Amino acid sequence: PMVSQQAAPTVSSKPSCKPAVFVPVDRSPEIQEARLKLPILAEEQVIMEAINENPIVVICGETGSGKTTQVPQFLYEAGYTSSNGIIGITEPRRVAAVSMSQRVAKEMNLSHRVVSYQIRYEGNVTDETQIKFMTDGVLLKEVQKDFLLLKYKVVIIDEAHERSMYTDILIGLLSRIVPLREKKGLPLKLIIMSATLRVEDFTENTRLFAVTPPVLQVDARQFPVTVHFNKKTPLDDYSGECFRKVCKIHRMLPSGGILVFLTGQAEVHSLCRRLRKAFPFQKNSTAGDDDDRKESVEEMRKFKKSRRRKKAATLPQINLDNYAVVPVDEGDEDRDAETDDDIAGSDVDLDLGDGDSEEEEKSDSSLPLYVLPLYSLLAPEKQAKVFRPPPPGTRLCVVATNVAETSLTIPGIKYVVDCGKVKKRFYDKITGVSSFRVTWISQASANQRAGRAGRTEPGHCYRLYSSAVFMDFEKFSAPEITKRPVEDLILQMKALNIEKVINFPFPTPPPAEALAAAEELLIALGALKEPPMTGRLKEQQAAKLSCPISPLGRVMATFPVAPRYAKMLALSRQHDCLPYTITIVSAMTVRELFEEFDRPAASEEETVKLKGKKGRLVQMQKIWAGQGSLQKLGDLMVMLGAVGACEYSGCTPKFCEENGLRYKAMLEIRRLRGQLTTAVNSVCTDAGLYVDPKMKPPTEAQATYLRQIVLAGLGDHLARRVQAEELLDDKWKNAYKTALLDDPVFIHPSSVLFKQLPEFVVYQEIVETTKLYMKGVSAVEPEWIPVLLPPYCHFGKPLENPPPSYCPETGRIRCHRPSVFYRVSWQLPAVEV
Ligand code: ADP
Ligand code: MG
């Protein structure tokens, strides 16, 4: 083919870098014609020369210019795969890895045995594979096994502008791997590809690359896009606003595809349904929609195996060394935020009422609307539909999540409807537990979305928010790495055997104090091997910053939750505690399980009503708290009980309303339980867990184990009640001392343990209102502390003049200082482990 001949290698000064063979590709005429229209084809020679001459190259280009589909083909034709070594391309999203491998295979007229993909749970890589698309997580796992990535001749990091955590770490790692490969005489080419967004973090970062890599700019044909802002910004119902906007466009504006940006799968389906109802097209198009939903429920069922381990309960003591799971090899975590929508099934339906306007909008337009959904988990065959021309005489309308922003380019789009929101993962500062939330996008994202309208002709972008709101958007979204809790990240890197995290060449590093604090916590949790306490303080501190991972840490690293919670999960295979721990961790992640009745009321009548409701809730909480050891599990038992009771009743809005539970929170917990169960099953392949909504309450013994498990995970959130003789003044009455704060803290009045004042408690979080209050409180037994939390204990000599509360016989624990260390008598009774 003509174009490829242009790229025939030129003579280079470094022959070892440049393959000499030219590999012909047999493309169909239609494909060849479509390729020739792509702006990047004109740059093939420049791009290939830059790659031949430099170990690292950055390629920037407008989305849709052809980077992802064409650069691997350029390399293939230039012979980069002709001697041992393949081309690897990483994508932050699974959907892109799968669909791009299929597209490239088709363009090159090669089978998927040669152009393949690998994502976490599936792939079609063979011995013949020469071009391999994968998620960034998959390549990161490969680095763990083969640090030099010897299998690859070229590694392409695609969509680097997304700044996903794994992509960032990969770029840091590759900045070291490339020179190492050079030294070995087996050079590796690194190509970083990005949409036209900020790339200085990569190129002007001397820690990263010794020599600034060349940046190639691919100019794209971009037609002007007229941007229309809404005068007012709708508060909540952006989905309804999208519906109205699409109806208007379809009825009033000339032909051309419509692309709608929404935030999640449920929303996408809901809008598709409404649009299909308003502009009926084909009976079976709605059926197809239902199929999609069935499929995602089916995914969930796959994990429902019935095998459960039965084991007689023995000593009420968890074993800290019992954290064995069967880790799986390949791994990636899908960070597409919309994926959280469906794991627990299809119960969540965000169809936003608004029935009247639906009737109103019922169109008399003669042109049918061909409505297609597009989101990450959609089956690949269904995704592929958006790339094909719509049936003749119809208008294409794609309702998509963020995947259509830069990962996939849909042909023929002339109108973009942008709700301005995106679903993102957020991390709780205190707990580190992540949850999904819908927030405003960045200005850069808004402009990317608008750009989707001007690919083939001038277009229009309808922003469902005001220009004032747009001006308030952040310019770019911050790199993921600066927003995640770092203890989690550090654990992941240690699992990669990167010990000196502080020296790692991050494109954007997290703050140093954050790194040090994270390392400290991980040592305390037992996820890292503690350094020997020898040498000078400075050396000790340095050693603390480069501890290797422990076997427990490796297990913890496989769970998709913050390390404290990962430790709880890791210990919970004992005594069948996993389903309970999963539920507790899910419930702790969801804020405000219970309705708030302490709000000021508008009328006398309402005050009475609220009081009644609150009374009822308090009563229910007492019931959910159970008796004995269950009751000592405290607020966490209340969470378990509430979830169990709610699910037993079928999790209806009515039940929630009557019992003071927040319906939305309950749905969220159900979903998280599904998600975590799936994750645990993928790690513990023999656990065969399934979500049993109507879970039985834990047994007395299990409740004891659960308290120990919670203590083992929340060790740094331990608090001890101040004893009478320690009362400094009245403000310490009923107060607790914690390891982290000097001030008195109190059990929150809403806690079921508020009146009981156990001697030792662990808490989920501290909130500050009129006082510092602990929430999510469980009682723990003092004698467990030295066994389960040795790093937090100081084993000292018995005191010469012990204060009255000190009891050498029972070895009661004293806390000398409110901070950090608990002094434990050496005479503690041995606890059998
Ligand atoms: P970039 O990576 O620069 O964003 P791509 O290589 O993904 O660009 O896309 C180049 C072009 O190929 C786009 O215009 C897109 O429409 C087209 N394309 C990509 N995937 C497919 C597909 N599966 N079917 C048809 N066209 C496709
Ligand atoms: Mg691309």
Image (cartoon, rainbow, N blue to C red):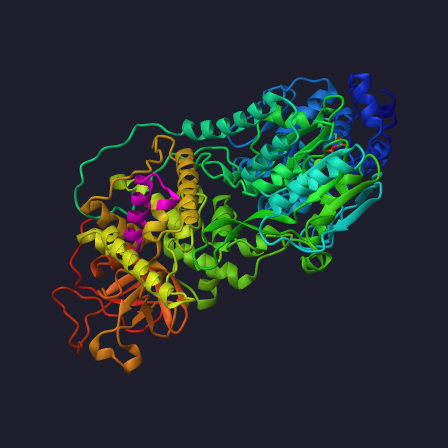
Horizontal and vertical percent position of residue 28: 79, 16
Q: Is residue 475 shown left or right of residue 322?
A: right
Which residues fall within the magenta stretch? Answer: 635-654
Residue 50, quarter of the rendered image: top right
Q: Residue at x 46, y 28 (%)?
A: 299
Residue 215 appearing in the image: yes
Horizontal and vertical percent position of residue 246: 69, 39
Q: Nearer the viewer, residue 744 or 288?
A: 288
- Vertical comparison of 142 with 726: above or below: above
Return the residue found at the far bottom. 729
Is residue 623 in the magenta section?
no
- Vertical comparison of 320 with 790: above or below: above
Is residue 650 in the magenta section?
yes
Quadrant location, ligand no. 2:
top right
- Vertical comparison of 198 with 404: above or below: below
**Magenta stretch secondary structure, dominant:** helix
Horizontal and vertical percent position of residue 394: 73, 26
Q: How many marks?
A: 0
Residue 173 appearing in the image: no
Q: Quadrant of the N terminus?
A: top right
Q: Residue at x 82, y 17 (%)?
A: 29
Horizontal and vertical percent position of residue 735: 29, 73
Q: Nearer the viewer, residue 778 or 386?
A: 386
Q: Nearer the viewer, residue 175 or 534?
A: 175
Q: Is residue 771 shown left or right of residue 392?
A: left
Return the residue found at the far left. 809
Q: Residue at x 36, y 37 (%)?
A: 325
Residue 767, quarter of the rendered image: bottom left
